[in-house]
Image (cartoon, coloured by chain):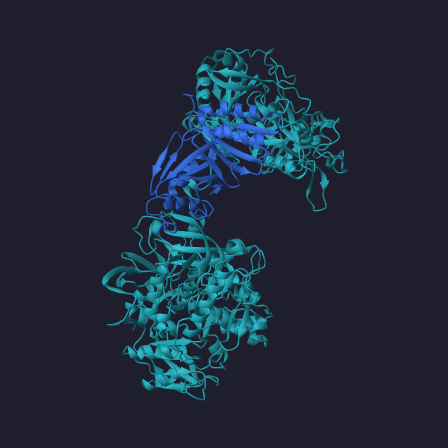
Amino acid sequence: MSTRLANGGRLLDKGRKIDFTFNGKRMRGFEGDTIASALLANDQMMVGRSFKYHRPRGVVASGAEEPNGLVGMGTGADFEPNQRVTTTELFDGLTCTSQNHWPSLDFDVGAINTKLSRFLPAGFYYKMFIYPRPFWKHVYEPIIRKSAGLGRAPDQRDTDTYEHFYAFCDVLVIGGGVAGLQAARAAGATGAKVLLIEQTAHWGGRAPVDGGTVGGQPVDKFVDEIVAELAAMDNVTMRNRTMGAGVYDHGYALGYERVGDHQPAAKGPRHRLWRIRAAQIVTATGAIERPLSFAGNDIPGVMLASAVRDYVVDFGVSIGDRTVVVTNNDDAYRTAITLKKNGLDVPAILDARVPTQDSPLMAEAKGLGIRVLMGHGVSSVQGGKRVTGVGVCSQAGEGAVLEEIACDAVAMSGGWSPVVHLWSHCGGKLIWDEATAAFRPDVDNAPTGAKGEAFVTPAGAANGALSLGNVLSDATSAGAAAAKAAGHTGDAVAVPEVENIDEARMAPVWMMPQGAGVKKRQKAWLDYQNDVKVSDIQLAAQEGYESVEHAKRYTTLGMATDQGKLSNINGLAILSDALGQPIPQTGTTTFRPPYTPISMASITGEARDERFMPIRQTPMYDWHVENGAFFEPVGQWRRPYTYQKSGETIEQAVSREVKATRASLGMLDASTLGKLVVKGKDAGKFLDMLYTNMMSTLKPGRCRYGLMCSENGFLIDDGVVARIDDDTFLCHTTTGGAESIHGHMEEWLQTEWWDWDVYVANLTEQYAQIAVVGPRARETLEKLTGDDISGEALPFMAWKDITLGGIAARAYRISFSGELSYEIAVKASEGRALWDALLAAGQPANITVYGTEALHIMRAEKGFIMMGDETDGTVIPQDLGLNWAISKKKDDYIGKRAQARSHMTDPTRWKLVGLETVDGGVLPDGAYATAEGKNANGQRETQGRVTSTYHSPTLERGIAMGLVLNGPDRMGEVLEFPRLDGTVMRAKIVDPVFFDKDGEKQNV
Amino acid sequence: MSNSVSALNGASATGFATVRDMGLQGMITLRGDLSAAAIKNAVKTAAGGDMPSAGHISLSDAGSAAWMSPDELLIVVPYADADAKLAEITKGMGDAHHMAVNVSDARCMFAVSGDDALVREALAKLMPVDLSPAAFKIGQFRRSRMAQVPAAVWMADTGEARIVCFRSVAQYVFDLLKGATAPGSEVRYMAR
């Protein structure tokens, strides 16, 4: 059994006990524990079931590479799935539950899959569920989803907060082990601004566990000193619990800080995403130990040798009383020695190598009385939910059991792989190192910046330097080189003196024993989390998946939440062997950020709830909210669609607003309308180019409706232009077009007509704009002004500066409704005051505030087009019968040449007409008018489509506009519009102006 | 004037730094050839200071002038003076090609005040700008974005940041700043 030792646990504060629960069971740990170490201290070896076969799984590792130990943490709004037990710090009151089992962790029905494993080979899902296709969505997908998956999604809103932080530095050092610390010291000494981040809560990485002496003292003392030294440097910032998640172009890196995970009651954000801009990045990300592929290597109790050592030294936890060590390298001897020195039994070290002489570590182990079996390996592990023993075999053979050794833990080591993820994220290349049988950074092919310079430097074990001495000297030069590349050439630091311990060369062992038969290979796991075995990769190779990227996706090797941190190298070694090619030729899959999963909420940062997205508000916004506005989004604005009174439906409210406006007086908040000022002696010339019609001839004091097209001739915006003075125009745009048309104007001015004297400013928000509309508009305004606004003094399509209720205003006599109408612009700060004054003044005329839907209906009744309804990016003004607004006198305007192209002048282009339903009903929006016959795809031919459709409260019938083949020539013809329910609506082609065709109402 | 209200009407919030709506501010957009004598004189007359260099704001008791782009300045004066100052500028510029418009009501100004480093850190949660004291000194002016909207920022004094954004997003920006200064969320990257 695993248990807490009486001594040891350098990371623990044994004075502070912490209570927590696992699957409802109360357990106790200490401050400094991870969930994993605390579970193991409570003899909870088994932590979950595997993904596919539901096999019992225990903790394998002690860090970010852990594949099995994922739990659901918290409850309700605090619940979060897939929390890695090896990297989650214990806190008082923590609750966690294991995942992927039913009905319980101990007894799981899905475990039957393991008996059926020969029927569930690589690519099983692809093979099994490909036919029949109609089953994909409703039969197969629900089954697969139910059987697969790890944790369940939370069902309540997260109540924590998250944030981003933009940080800038000269040198970012990722990893706070001895390499990172030394690199930060070397970079910091030059005067560079250094940010050092470390994913765990501790500095020094695994060096204190592995031991050694630096400068004549134990390495942990060296760590303490360097941490104190760095903490005292003003130009160095150290952040623990902050993982380097990704490295991107231009020295951009993401740091994932777990601010509140270990102290959930504290104020402040739970996670903070650091968005770092660094001139240079040092990746001191260490190395990860590889498992060995032998049968039963997934049985709880089989663990990485380094992890076994970590639990003893860091947390005072023994994994078992009797631990068999199996290895292909010297490092695992440290585990055996550590266990022995802590009074635990090591029945044997099975070393796959056959060395000619003992290395110092071998000699030390033997000196402690540990039995060392050279040239041996594990034939298979015995046990179900817990290791009970191992069968010993010759590594060179096929697995005949020479001897059985009873044990309750197996410590395995297949060598070390440098963590090259962050080096690789932005294009750093790798080379295969024969001596360590691992990929390490190819420093001559580093990620490069804008000038082609390398901007990432690997350091220490992450660079393939595995011994303490090599780590520190490599880190020293890496830190100094990064600082120099960032432009800092201050003091240099010396490489600390390290007493080196010679190690015998490791031997690559990808399968154990070397000649393992198929039964053993089917029980030799590569990827624990996704249940991929040696046999699966071999099958994939046999079936032709030669590319490592294809084999990965076919078998799901390395596709789980651990992204193959343990399985990657072993898997591609097996694949290479099956393909009969060297490992470097197979290559690796692509390393992508984030290094380990980061919370979605940290990516979202502050952008949730009221900060989810900006909602643009007009000065009258509060009034709208208080008066029952039903809002619709228009760009980033919220505009009232209609104002519902109690008991009214949306339709009734809209109808009331239209009728009241036509009968007496309506008022609209038109502030969102774009308002661009164009000024300069060439302003008229410029607008003549931008609009299809002539603007330069407009007289000051007058307004003109204009159309704007793209270079390709398509209609992009429309609106009324007012000439303010000889040099100045005010161009109204659509609400959604204000920013884009401003950009359009600036682009032409900056790139094409840079020598014209024209400036543009976007004054959209400077003004509140209120439309006062209806037969009683003038008399209402006259109550608030002494200025002459009679039909003679302020005629249709003119503007005038007036004073309204004491407020300086500009009144534009323009109409989008066909009514007598004034759009009043005042400074935004006075908008609400004017709004209130108008409401009061309009009371006798039953002033009715209306929303965008009433606006749209009234314009449709008048046959006015609407951008985005009648236009969709493929429509030209000529399609809409707007030839009157296209100047024939001008040599050029933007879009003119395009509109002369053959397709644009094609007489069969669909043209705008009005559509009047035969039964008075309302046509569905976007409905197509059918024609005889079928097209090449067997679809019904069409001859037109609906662009706008409403129920007209004024005419008490459905009205619509549409684009129809030869439409204007076919007045009176009836078209058929099939509806989604299978019925057909019939509508007559009519003039698009349904109401007051002569414009008598607006010209009073 | 009594009718005029800024978007948030002087709202404020206090966390580890204080966020305040600065109320109505006079702002004039002035575009033209920034090297011309006429425009330099106009800046002097309107804002009382010198022409700001690129990326800077010239601060004086009478007002300030901020460099917005190679051909654009933002002149900040008391709200009540904006129209008069605009007229002065227009007169002073004479026939020189330029544009001067009152944008006072299109904008909103916020102050974030408190410990200098903490104020900078709060803004650095929202703006992708190096706001460290070494990189962003008093007198520097930066147009950037604040989360999802455009914003300009400068340090008016030690521990006194000013932010200008569009009026329509005043509530959003206020909420952002309030969140960024929430107690307990101090980053302590610039502050030690």
Query: Relative to residue B77, is residue A725 drawn left or right?
Result: right
Chain B, hue in figure:
blue
Q: Is residue A636 visible to the viewer in this orientation of the structure? A: no
| Above/below status of A18 relative to A374 | above
| Above/below status of A418 relative to A978 | below
| Residue A79 place in picture, x, y as percent | 36, 53
| Residue A616 place in picture, x, y as percent | 48, 34
Report the quarter where the C terminus of chain A lies: top right
| Residue A437 place in picture, x, y as percent | 50, 75
Question: Is A713 in front, or is A654?
Answer: A713
The cyan-tinted chain is A
The image shows a total of numbered marks equal to: 0
Question: Is A736 in front, or is A491?
Answer: A491
Q: Which residue lies furthest to the bottom in this view?
A: A356
| Residue A54 place in picture, x, y as percent | 41, 66
Question: Is A83 in front, or is A540?
Answer: A83
